[in-house]
Image (tube, rainbow, N blue to C red):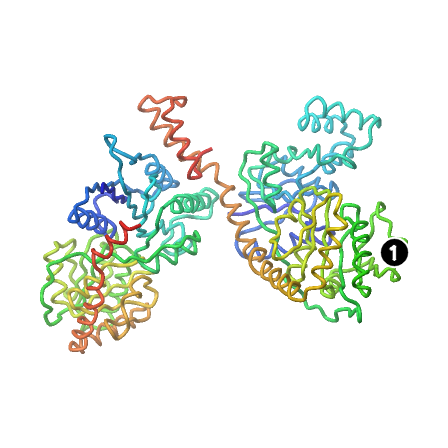
Amino acid sequence: MRIAVCAPQVLFERGGTEILAESLSVQLRQRGHEVEEIRLPFKWYPGAAVLREALQWRLLDLDQTHSDPVDLVIATKFPSYAIRHPNKVVWLVHQFRQAYELDRAEYGQFGEDPFDRATVRAVHRVDRKTLAEARRLFAISKNVADRLKSSTGLHAEVLPPPPQQLAYRPPQDGEYILSVGRLDRAKRVDLLLEAAALDDGLELVVAGEGPDRERLERLSREHGLDGRVTFPGRVTDDELADLYAKCIAVFYAPFDEDFGLVPYEAFLAEKPVVTTRDAGGPLEVVVDRQNGLVCEPAAAGVAEACAWLAAHQEEARAWGRSGKQVAERITWDAVVDRLLAA
Amino acid sequence: MKVAYFSPLPPERSGISDYSALLLPALGERIDVRVAKRGKTKPPRGTDVALYHVGNNPDAHAWIVDALRRRPGLVVLHDFVLHHLVAGMTLGRGDAEGYLDAMQRDAGVVGRLLAHGVVDQLLPPIWEERAEDFPLTSVVLDRADGVICHSRYVEAKLIGYGYDGPIRVVPMPAWPSPELGEVPEHEGRFPVIGCFGYLNGAKRVPQLLAAFERLRSRFPEALLVLGGSTAPDVKLDTVGQERGVLRLEHLDEQALWRSLAACDIVASLRSPTMGETSGMVVRTLSLGKPLVVSDIGWFSELPDAVAAKVPVDDREIEALAGVLERISGDDGLRRRMGEAAADAARTEHDLGHVADLYVQALEEIGGGSNVRDAVVRDVAEAAHEVGIDENDPELSEVAARAREVGLGN
């Protein structure tokens, strides 16, 4: 088949969606399909820019090239699913969250003036129209599917993406709590830093880059965490595999996250995960005291969970092994079969 | 976003006044609403968007249309036909020219000539006989940024009338069923059929009486409760208890609810329709009572599970009698219709749901044209920079795609 995989690209950044689109393309090619990854730069501000970006996707013509049809378009994330195609399948990473559950909340972008309100409503209208056109709808997690249902009434089948293939090492005795991911406020790495401030036995490694890095580094200095927190920035896949192998546990507690690949990676590295009750997607895979700890979204709860795992490394290893069994069940064979059967 | 809210309100008595009294608290929980004082045509200070409730009664709504003329906004059109309102705002104010202009806008030279006939008293007032042929709705539509109506029927009328602005259909909200207290018992009487409201010719009272007479041949103990004041065109002098009819002329709100609750079936017939909805029907839904309605306008859109619909034609009386007999004779059907009615009140007509739809409409329409303009301006500027003119077919393609996703003008 000739397949176009569509995803927006936040310039000079590489996060979950980019990894998902790349991995999907690789997997499809490995199975003998011709694949093009279609990326358009995505900038969600100012004002109604998100709508202009949706219109740009709408204007693409992927019906055919050189008279040969493009058999299938797989769109992933707002606004790539605005694309027109007679065989459009959406594997929804997420809608434009600032227009939905993040609206009028801490991480929202739109104000109360009529222009902003109308922009939010216009995003809803774009979604209702363009997602309903899809021949089949999948969502990367139940959390994303539930949000889609409540915002548009559309039903999506849950289809979690397999985690990134790293050269996982045999797990070693843990030395630190690891945080992995883009550093922005919604990922709530500050919770982990505040936890370390409450427990001077905790050591942290915060891997990743992002707009919140400067604030987080300042916060760690203010809490006197110098020497106990390392910010290695963006790491290579090899370095990441090393970091996983040597940690006690992985902290991953964004607010109401769509899915989160990090818990799956942690599990493949046989490490337990510390998350919070309001983390959203991670709660679909992290089960309290089976493969991790689920605590209140407060520094004291996070500190207690991390300290417990540091003090009970035997249990931590067992929970990591238990998590691995969960992560290994999600395979690219199953994902590709369902996407192409659509 | 701050909303200026123009509507009749209690103690002014009208269906729209009751409607706003019900809606406002729920709307106020969701959005900043500033209610305009009656007669004040200037929007309350600092408001971003104005919402105008418009019905056909000039006494209640003329000042609201005056306010709309000062500042465009979102119009809630409770009646599609506004002839009576416009006549009141023109002829009623000694402005014959205004009436001629309004008629000309609706129906061209013929309209103007007819209006001359009315002004010169050579023809009977159009609003009494042929208002639906000359709805004069453009008087408000010309200034409407968008319209909220309550039925697909009115939506279709608006489109047919040539209105090309945004239209949102928002269901009537259901009143919460109040504490009823003592419900009248019509002991030994079955079925109890109710018909409530201002009893004018459009409520088909003569047809209902004739159908009820037939029903009594199978159900001799049937009772027809006619609740509400009577219009001059309806004669009820000869009907009374001996014909199985109970007249209740003066019903306050509480007594109305109790009387509705005492019914086995509520008939809410209508023809002609001006595109209006019926607060009585919605109250009946809240109480979970079976309904019989005319198959016309908004009433046709009620779910079949909730309301039996009677065509308005030569066989209306026969059909109405048949429907009343069928529902009266089937306990299971009455129960199912009642449950479906209560369910509709809890879902489709739920007050919170209706208020959410209002907020959606206000937010979409309040700044919608500016948002669309911003998107189109970006595209037009980029096109201009590379030498594509606004009349080039490439831009038509862009416009078509934009309209597909609700971003076009």
The residue at the far front in this view is B218
The residue at the far right in this view is B238
In this rendering, the count of numbered labels is: 1
Q: Position of residue B371 (x, y in %)?
A: 44, 38
Left or right: A106 as drawn, with respect to A222: right
Residue located 73% across and 24% down the image: B112
Instruction: Between residue A50 and residue B229, name the one nearer to us.
Output: B229
Q: Position of residue B406 (x, y in %)?
A: 44, 39
As helix, strand or loop, the secondary structure at mark 1 comes to: loop
Left or right: A241 as drawn, with respect to B107: left
Pointer 1 local density, CA inside 10 Å: few below 14, some 14–19, many at least 20: few
- Residue B398 sits in quarter: top left
Left or right: B119 as drawn, with respect to A283: right
Q: Position of residue A330 (x, y in %)?
A: 22, 61
Chain assignment, label 1: B
Instruction: Between residue A183 and residue A274, name the one nearer to us.
Output: A274
Left or right: A43 as drawn, with respect to B326: left
Instruction: Between residue B68 and residue B259, name the one nearer to us.
Output: B259
**Vertical arrangement, residue B156 with respect to residue A270, above or below:** above
Residue under numbered circle 1: B239
- Residue B314 sits in quarter: top right
Q: Position of residue B8 (x, y in %)?
A: 69, 48
Residue located 48% across and 40% down the image: B368
Name the kind of residue labelled 1 in the image: Val
